[in-house]
Amino acid sequence: MTAGLAFVLEGTEARHAVTVKRLAPGEPVDIVDGAGTRMSGRVLAASPAGLEVECASVAVEERPATRLVLVQALAKGDRDELAIETATELGIDAVIPWQSERSIVRWKGDRAAKAHAKWQSVVTAAAKQARRAWVPEVRPAVDTAALAALVEAAGLAVILHEDAVRPLRTVLESRREADGTEPREVLLIVGPEGGISPREVTRLCGKGAVTALLGHHVLRSSTAGPAAVVLASDVLGRWTAPSP
């Protein structure tokens, strides 16, 4: 797409823009592909059949040097969906559904595929709400054995746990200072409403994970991940304004 040319958006996204967002000719609009490319322009014409936009600029937004991955245990009452929705708005890069020992919710058979698709729909909608150019990927669901393998291969895996001694900020800053480089990915592991079992903590720490504390209070499964994303983004400089 070149500045000055017209682009026509069709299908579901166009209908949403016209009937829900009620975009009208002359209004500014951003269109993204979910993989980092953002086109900014203004609406030329709007109808349920399509949205015609005059392209003003096209930019490609790079991924952060260190990506944050939320490993969210399945939880009841849609708390897990609330967690990934909020974490997406705050900037998470990927989500991994975790079938932990104490998860009451179970993804089995046909339900697993439908639930995974629902999670992807949730993060896609949240990315649109936050006007993000990148839509986080929902990676395949894992059990504890599979998660242990991911932990072993990760640059840094942090279990958010109420019995931890070191604050998350300290864990992130100390790991950065250890060898002078940032890890490529940081796994932020959140348990279900009943917490992570001691056996799981031992197993994951045996593969290289570390525990970290989020403040003085016990957070719900739906809030621990988003809180960690905020703190990690600050420590890792992900929210630093770009140089002019």
Image (cartoon, rainbow, N blue to C red):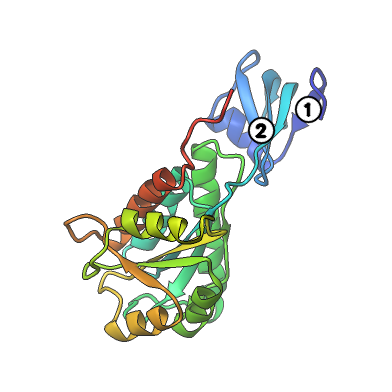
**Image coords of residue 37 (percent x, y):** 70, 38
Secondary element at tag 2: strand
Q: Nearer the viewer, residue 181 or 47?
A: 181
Q: Are marks 2 and 1 in contact (CB under 8 Å)?
A: yes
Answer left or right for 213 relative to 126.
Answer: left
- Quadrant where the C terminus sits is top right
Viewer-nearest residue: 32 or 187: 187
Q: Amino acid under label 1? A: Phe
Q: Which residue is mark 2?
A: 31
Quick one: SS at disc 1?
A: strand
Q: Position of residue 160 (x, y in %)?
A: 32, 65
Q: Amino acid at mark 2?
A: Ile
Disc 1 crowd rating (10 Å Cα; few below 14, some 14-19, many 20+) is some
In the rendered image, residue 57, in percent from the top left (x then y), is placed at 72, 23
240 displayed left or right of 54: left
Q: Position of residue 157 (x, y in %)?
A: 44, 68
Name the residue carrying label 1: 7
Tell me which numbered mark, 2 or 1, is placed earlier along the sequence: 1
